[in-house]
Amino acid sequence: MIRLEHVTKRYGEMMAVNDVSIEVEAGEFAILLGPSGCGKTTTLRAINRMIDIDSGSIFVDGINVLERQADELRRHIGYVIQSIGLFPHMTIERNVATVPRLLGWDAKKTQTRVRELLELVGLDPTVYGPKHPAQLSGGEQQRVGVARSLAADPAVLLMDEPFGALDPISRQHLQVEFRKLQRDLGTTVVFVTHDVEEAVIMGDRIALMKDGTLVQFDTPEALWLNPASEFVCDFFGEELALKILSRHTVAGIPLESGPVDGLKHVSAETTLKDTLAAMVSSGKSAIAVDGADGVPAGVLRFETLIRALKEPS
Amino acid sequence: MASSSSTRAFAGDQSIGATGALIGALVSVAGTYVQLRPNRIMAGADATAPAALGPGAWLLLGLWTIALLASLPRTGRAGALVRGLTANIIMVLSTLLIARRGVVFIAEQGDAARVSVGLSYWLTLLACYIVIFSALKRIESRPLRVLVGISGVTGIAVLLVSGQLDSLSIMQEYEVNAEAFQIAFRQQLAYTVGATSVALVIGLIAGVFSAKNPRVEGSVFAVLNIAQVLPALSFIGLLIVPMGWLGANVPALGALGVSGIGWAPVFVVLLSYALYPITRNVVTALRTLDGGVTDAARGMGMKPSQRLFSVELPLSFPVVLAGVRIAAVQTTSAAILAALVGGGGLGQIVFFGVQQAAADLVLLGVIPIVGLALVIDASLRFVEGMVRTAQGGGIA
């Protein structure tokens, strides 16, 4: 869906992006991760031509972006930034209607779409539609930012630390909700962050960058099990294993039969992170897993959990 | 501990209020409040308020005492309201008392008799404004602010229109010069409105290009800076020859009345002065726009012209309007110079007054200029506030 081939961008002597090639599948959630100054934002902004690259090529849906008129291209690629950038002098409705109006949709179609989008991001259109951005909380504003970017139903969405300025609770909510929304819509997302936790929770694959180069582009599990270099290990640290636990649930891990007396109970949908936490807090190296009917289906042992994680299905 | 001692002491606005009230009380008993002359030429008698107004002066003094008491510590918001309203009453009452005294004096001395206000009266108005200013620092409710802010001026305007002030010398000067005054006033207004609106159009264009291109900015402001530092009178002088040549050699301009003297050079000077604040504010507003907003506008695929007209200029509007306000006020007072080169305006009334050594005729020119500047300033501030409120969705 998105293909970067040998993309290079220089600022004077500095190589902001150095020969980066990445291919993102349709419907995939790809993360650009790395320390500040690693070139992740520059790479992202090259995709919708907010920045013009020096060499290499970028294809979106098979079309070379350099051959398209930049404004026209951007109307079909969603764009969400950390500072949100809602237009303060326009109502929420008008903000969300920006791209449909640019595309010349008629008023009725635009209005229907705006209501639909606000509902999609969990904001009541009748309440929020007529308000101005200053009357909304940061979290609500970024919901509007997401709705605005999805207005023309783009196949590709570019997000530059979209939840970075939010308080931890709104951030967590938006991460979960947005990930679900993205799966439902099947939108291809390229998402810039410097937060490892956010990257591991949300990304299908993570492109780790350093000094303008791509270090490794793979699933979090593969980055953990098969790191390409010392830098990958150092960047993620030992805690990566714990973060990966929250990506998986108990479902699919072989259970043993045995007595469940005195054990804590979890369900098949519980994440491995919560399962491990329950083991630690109960002081036992095993936990009872309940089936869909609420009756214990078996016992999960700590050793089994660790082994399952090392051999991801 | 600190708070209990601070409630006993004067707060900032209260000490300002008390100072104003003391000045007011002082000039109610001392200094020239009214000048009484048998006719326009003869030197007259300077009278203090008690001498000229009798019991009225003691009434004023009593009101000032109320204003002073309402400035004492711990009088709070009620005190502010009382002293603010009292100051407004004093403004109207002192003006009316002098006019009533004038009626009696003219009845005694005949129609040629003149009654003018003196320094102590002007100081009374100043004291009133000090007290009103101090009161507004503490009053938050919008209707009450308007009441305290303008009821005195409105009261004097009502007295003026209803003919209650006709016995004052300045109004007699108006009676004699009514036609000239009205022409001059319209000319003054035309200079302000004309120069400011042309400057707005040019300033917007120059400002937009300057904001996008530092090199354009350099040349635009090089020219505007020169115009800004030239003294108005020498600027007009410099224009006499080129404007005269244009008027004589370009028939279209000649037909409009462009010549080395008259309205044209004055208009050019006023326009040049007005351009600076407007252009500067356009550039500043565009440069200081929220980067996230302009980035989002670009990222969603707005063309440069769409960004300019639907995002950048609307968001710059309050700051641009502030530039227009400065330009308009500045132009209003600078247009007084038009009279020096036969360009008309209220300056003409002022210069007539100076020639005839008639102080009240000078005032007849000056007061409307000050009034006009204040009205323009207040109304544009009001519009600015409305725009900001509308853009922020009701949040200041």
Image (tube, helix red, strand yellow):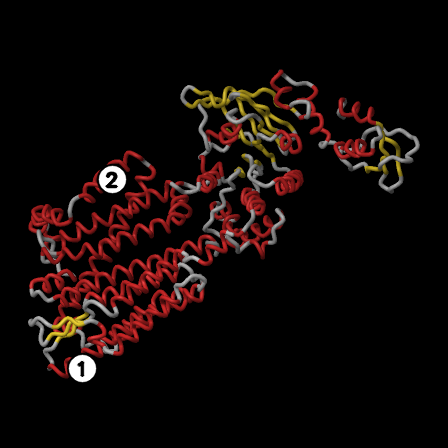
**Percent position of residue A228, x then y:** 63, 17
Residue B238 in the figure: left or right of residue A19: left
N-term mark: 2 or 1: 1
Q: Quadrant of the C terminus of chain A?
A: top right
The label number, if any, that marks residue B285 in the structure image: none
Residue A137 in the figure: left or right of residue B381: right
Residue B201 shows up from this direction: yes
Task: Check the residue under mark 1 and report the chain it is in.
Answer: B
Q: Which residue is mark 2?
A: B220
> How crowded is the residue under tag 1: few (<14 C-alpha within 10 Å), some, or many (20+)?
few
Question: In front of the other: label 2 or label 1?
Answer: 1
Amino acid type, label 1: Val
Looking at the image, which residue is at 59% across and 34% down?
A: A189
**Percent position of residue B328, x then y:** 26, 55
Tag 1, which secondary structure? helix
CA separation in Å, label 2 and label 1: 61 Å
Relative depth, front residue between B131 and B206: B131
Q: Is B91 rendered above or below residue A73?
A: below
Looking at the image, which residue is at 14% across and 56% down?
A: B338
Looking at the image, which residue is at 35% across and 58% down?
A: B16
The label number, if any, that marks residue B104 in the structure image: 1
Q: Is B63 rendered above or below residue A119?
A: below
Looking at the image, which residue sits at the far top? Answer: A229
The picture quadrant where one finds residue B213 is top left
**Percent position of residue A66, x then y:** 46, 29
Task: Check the residue under mark 2 and report the chain it is in.
Answer: B
